[in-house]
Image: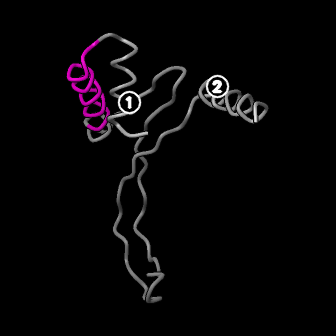
Amino acid sequence: MTKADIVERVADGTGLTKLETEAIIEGFLNTVIQSLRDGNGIEIRGFGSYRVKKKNSRYARNPRTGEKVFVDEHFVPTFKFSKDFKNAVNKGMQIKESDS
């Protein structure tokens, strides 16, 4: 599913236009990115939480050449699904499996 697919489904479900829905979804995504960039986490109950984790500098190996490469310290966004989210997906997949 792409962002366009999400926009279409949300627009169909809310009665908003696709243009309005796209602006809302873009606003949400930009807010998540900006919040993480500012060092703040985001928790959406029943969905999950976004955080930023610091990765220390280290030596890695280029898999193509085998050459040892230094990787600088960097930060990566992470997402942890809520228990409710995991249970809903699991239940949906079990129903889908039993139908086939």
Name the amino acid type tagged 1. Ile
Left or right: where 78 falls relative to 27: right
Give the residues drawn in magenta, as a range.
16-33
Q: Residue at x 43, y 88 (%)?
A: 67
Query: Which image quarter: residue 71?
Result: bottom left
Name the amino acid type tagged 2. Ala
In which quadrant of the rendered image does the N terminus lie? Answer: top left
- Give the x, y percent position of residue 61: 47, 81
Task: Look at the numbered disc 2 and give the secondary structure of its residue.
Answer: helix
Q: Please, which residue is most extreme toward the front here?
A: 100
The residue to which callout 2 is attached is 88
Query: Which image quarter: residue 87?
Result: top right
- 34 vs 77: above or below: above
Left or right: where 71 falls relative to 84: left
- In the picture, the disc for residue 6 is 1
Tell whether position 29 is magenta. Answer: yes
Left or right: where 58 falls relative to 86: left
- Give the x, y percent position of residue 51: 43, 39
